[in-house]
């Protein structure tokens, strides 16, 4: 049997068709080839069209079908991973009411901060495990305050993956994991947060039917199946936010296990069995894919908005006609420290780990006679690695002491310069695996449809590709301290 995994990224949609017997991808496709834009109507805003996501999902599936490497009718289940925290609003006819306010949008920071104080900081942290901050509930409150005509038409509020599942099946469902990332869920009471709904004046009826992550969230509609050459009636059997899904794809499911990604944003994600929280909400706690009320599995998440997007900006702004691989090769010719050039990669909205400050990106100490584009490429990757170190130190303050971090061989983890900088700056070894979000979503579909009896069976063929240990921590600690000083100077401005 084949499994279809869909990863709804900020930059593009990727799909993979996976053979359940081997857990290997038979075919993969991405759409579009160029990076999808973000609409920024004002500074700090970030929106995308849900209907555009849906069109791109269909285009990606048809592109994968066109490889002729499989029979689409052999696909038996669909899994969906999606960019976290996005707000999707539909009316009673399931029509989209406005573009999605996505994860890196900063407009609702003040709304969330006020809710944090008014509901009570201690109560928010002990029940929500987070400040309402800049998450989905606060984005919805912004719509209520600034677009009352839109708010009045809302039938259901969804996360991006809920919306795509609805387009496949016509059913509106969500999960505790999704609700927790939206800051709608009370962990202490194991229910929708009465405090959040009361404070913001939301009706609980706007929340779709709550199901497990690994469960049927609807069956593929005949007209959609016909358009995509798929078999009608197959289940949408899994939905998870991209970081929970990335952890799943790396078989990071049990307490103490840690995953990382460095795509558009950067994340360190650690699994815990404790309802833990950071008192400043700089790192956040959400329900993991295998969390239940009786078996607690929480994902403690550090997010850095500006990682891959910083690397892409550097590529564009230097005007180089280079592939990322060629950029990495050029950066590798520059010695660690980039000859004194420093980059702060925080130019993609408010950063939660910096207390929701908008620091912006900075290139510091440019020497016009010394520094070349290659220096900029290396300084960007080092700056991103140092941002990970800064965030990991916050996680360490909260009791996390990882002995190893697992990552997929993708995005910045394709760069030896970045990997070297990451392991030496953090002091933690990295294990690399050949996996990605769309394959993880397919594996999730297999678990949700009971094609795999358990996670051990689902990952029986998962093999480590590389193990990279720190070799120059003293040198990188010194470089990091210089970088950290520059960051604190910007924060204090």
Image (cartoon, rainbow, N blue to C red):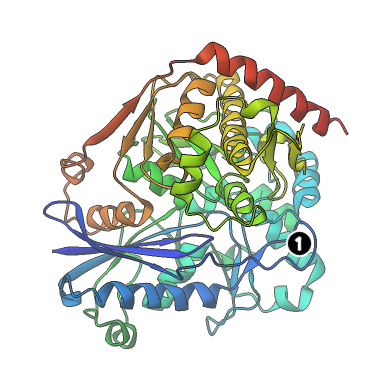
Q: Is residue 34 left or right of residue 485?
A: left
Q: Residue at x 75, y 30 (%)?
A: 487
**Which quadrant, please, contains the C terminus?**
top right
Answer yes or no: is residue 75 visible.
yes
Q: Is residue 41 above or below residue 491?
A: below
Q: Residue at x 32, y 78 (%)?
A: 62
Q: Residue at x 69, y 56 (%)?
A: 105
Q: Is residue 49 left or right of residue 446?
A: right
> In the rendering, at what x and y percent does residue 453 appear?
16, 48
Report the front residue among 310 and 143.
310
* Residue that badge 1 annotates: 142
- Circle 1: element type: helix
Q: Is residue 489 above or below residue 243?
A: above
Q: Quadrant of residue 441?
A: bottom left
Report the front residue among 18 and 149.
18
Report the front residue among 309 and 78.
309
């Amino acid at each position: 049997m084949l499994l279809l995994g869909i990863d709804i990224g900020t930059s593009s949609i990727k799909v993979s068709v996976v053979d359940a017997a081997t857990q290997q991808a038979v075919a993969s496709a991405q759409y579009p080839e160029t990076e999808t834009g973000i609409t920024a109507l004002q500074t700090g805003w970030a929106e995308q069209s849900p209907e555009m996501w849906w069109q791109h999902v269909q285009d990606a599936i048809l592109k994968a079908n066109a490889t002729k490497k499989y029979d689409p009718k052999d696909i038996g289940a669909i899994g969906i991973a999606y960019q976290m925290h996005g707000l999707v609003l539909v009316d009673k006819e399931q029509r989209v009411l406005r573009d999605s306010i996505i994860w890196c949008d900063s407009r609702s920071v003040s709304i969330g901060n006020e809710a944090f104080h008014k509901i009570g900081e201690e109560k928010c942290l002990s029940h929500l495990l987070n400040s309402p901050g800049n998450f989905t509930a606060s984005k919805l409150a912004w719509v209520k305050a600034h677009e009352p005509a839109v708010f009045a038409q809302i039938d259901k509020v969804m996360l991006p993956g809920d919306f795509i599942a609805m387009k496949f099946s016509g059913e509106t469902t969500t999960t505790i994991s999704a609700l927790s990332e939206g800051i709608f869920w009370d962990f202490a009471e194991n229910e929708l947060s009465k405090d959040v709904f009361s404070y913001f004046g939301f009706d609980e009826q706007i929340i779709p039917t709550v199901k497990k992550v690994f469960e049927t969230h609807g069956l593929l509609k005949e007209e959609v199946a016909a358009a995509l050459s798929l078999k009608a009636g197959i289940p949408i059997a899994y939905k998870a936010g991209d970081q929970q899904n990335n952890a799943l794809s790396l078989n990071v499911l049990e307490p103490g296990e840690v995953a990382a990604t460095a795509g558009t944003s950067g994340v360190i994600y650690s699994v815990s069995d404790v309802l833990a929280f950071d008192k400043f909400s700089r790192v956040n706690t959400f329900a993991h894919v295998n969390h239940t009320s009786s078996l607690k599995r929480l994902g403690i998440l550090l997010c850095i908005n500006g990682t891959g997007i910083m690397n892409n900006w550097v590529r564009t702004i230097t005007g180089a006609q280079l592939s990322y691989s060629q950029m990495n090769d050029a950066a590798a010719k520059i010695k660690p420290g980039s000859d004194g050039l420093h980059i702060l990669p925080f130019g993609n909205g408010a950063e939660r780990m910096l207390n929701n400050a908008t620091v912006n990106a900075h290139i510091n100490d440019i020497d016009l006679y010394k520094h070349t584009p290659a220096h900029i490429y290396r300084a960007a990757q080092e700056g991103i690695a140092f941002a990970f170190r800064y965030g990991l130190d916050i996680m360490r303050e909260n009791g996390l002491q990882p002995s190893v971090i697992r990552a997929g061989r993708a995005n910045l983890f394709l760069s030896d310069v970045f990997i070297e900088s990451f392991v030496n700056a953090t002091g933690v070894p990295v294990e690399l695996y050949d996996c990605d979000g769309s394959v993880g979503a397919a594996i999730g579909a297999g678990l949700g449809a009971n094609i795999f009896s358990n996670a051990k069976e689902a990952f029986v063929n998962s093999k480590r590709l590389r193990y990279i240990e720190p070799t120059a921590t003293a040198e990188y600690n010194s470089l990091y301290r210089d970088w950290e000083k520059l960051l604190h100077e910007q924060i204090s401005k």
